[in-house]
Image: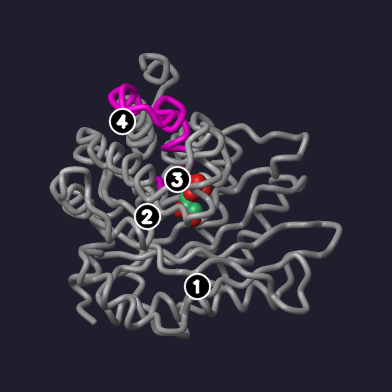
Amino acid sequence: MDKDHLARTAKALVAEGRGIFAADESGGTIAKRFAAIGVGSTEETRRDYRELLFRSKDALRQYISGVILFDETIRQSASDGAPLVKLIEAAGAIPGIKVDLGARPLPNFPGETITEGLDGLHDRLMNYYGLGARFAKWRAVIDINQDTGVPTEYAVEANARALARYAAHCQDANLAPIVEPEVLMDGDHDIERCAEVTEFVLNRVFAALYEARVFLEGMALKPNMVVAGKKCARRAPPEQVAEATLRVLRRTVPIAVPGVAFLSGGQSDVEATANLDAINRIRGPWALTFSYGRALQTSALKCWAGKPENVKAAQAAFTHRARMNALASQGRWTEKQEEAA
Ligand code: 13P
């Protein structure tokens, strides 16, 4: 383990005014996103779409620190033959890789999952490093369901342990781990319940990281924000989300961790930006930025609609969202800038 190298990578991922672009949708997820815009999912359409995003040079050059790739993408070449990883590097961003193999049902615990992918992880990480990846991501999924008593302590603990083993393996291979315990916002729970569950989950995750001897300075945390469930009638404004999120983070995340890069988790584009901005108007001892998938891509995907003549407009839409979130990561976003698109 090269601690200096890991700490440098982790720091660069959360550098001032930049955030992470999650472009690591699995085959099933990207097919769903393409179906919504009437585009078939083939190796070529997936390549074309990701190539257009990675060639949005201003976005990557100015606002994006790192790009999380899926296994297929890290091995793919652009239409002119240049490896996609090289496009990312040329724009000054760091290539990363999703290494979990997805969340599967946890036996005996209905409605809960365990993320798989630890077997053979060491060899896969060595291979990814050779392909240019300098950081990795593993996502654990925790649902909230008041009626069924989910999440259970057992499921949270099992996922925390897997995250810790993954993180230790990454550091052993000199890849900075992004540790992502996602508390879903699908339910009808209120913001207080989300805060309670997120605090419990992060506590267990950091206890597991400690026991696994993970080097905290050489990782980044990718949590959910503390928000009300999508089906909850009582919506929480950005100021409330920011206060609740920071309260939970202060109670659970050691300041040795250089940065926190939130997932968007199903928030709308502007909601994800407004909440990140409110969080950075309060601030904390860590860098607080974005690691968005959907909230960076939805508008670009719609603009593109699979048509080559729309590539420029889609790139402009992507760059705009990256810029808005970069401003939000500094607490400098305003609705006026949003409308100037
Ligand atoms: P969303 O921002 O769409 O939640 O995606 C982030 C991510 O990487 C989920 O694993």
Q: Which residue is mark 4?
A: 319
Tags 4 and 1 in contact by the CB under 8 Å rule?
no
Q: Which residues are magenta?
A: 290-315
Q: CA distance from mark 2 to mark 4?
A: 25 Å
Query: Which one is earlier in the sequence, the residue at label 4 or at label 1?
Result: 1
For the point 75% across and 40% down, the residue is: 231
**Residue 213 appears in which quarter of the rendering?**
bottom left
- State yes or no: Cβ of the residue under disc 3 lies below 8 Å from any atom of ligand 1: yes
Q: Which residue is mark 3?
A: 293
Judge left or right: residue 75 versus residue 227: left
Query: Which one is earlier in the sequence, the residue at label 3 or at label 4?
Result: 3
Q: Main secondary structure of the magenta part?
A: helix
Dot label at residue 286: 2
Is residue 309 a member of the stretch shown in magenta? Answer: yes
Q: Residues within 10 Å of mark 3 (few under 14, many from 20)?
A: some
Looking at numbered disc 2 in the image, what kind of residue is underneath it?
A: Trp
Looking at numbered disc 3 in the image, what kind of residue is underneath it?
A: Gly
Q: Helix, strand, or loop for circle 3?
A: loop
Tags 1 and 3 in contact by the CB under 8 Å rule?
no
Looking at numbered disc 4 in the image, what kind of residue is underneath it?
A: Thr
Q: Which residue is mark 1?
A: 206
Q: Position of residue 262 (x, y in %)?
A: 46, 50
Query: Which one is earlier in the sequence, the residue at label 1 or at label 3?
Result: 1
Judge left or right: residue 128 versus residue 338: left
Query: Which of pointers 4 and 1 indicates the residue nearer the eye?
Result: 4
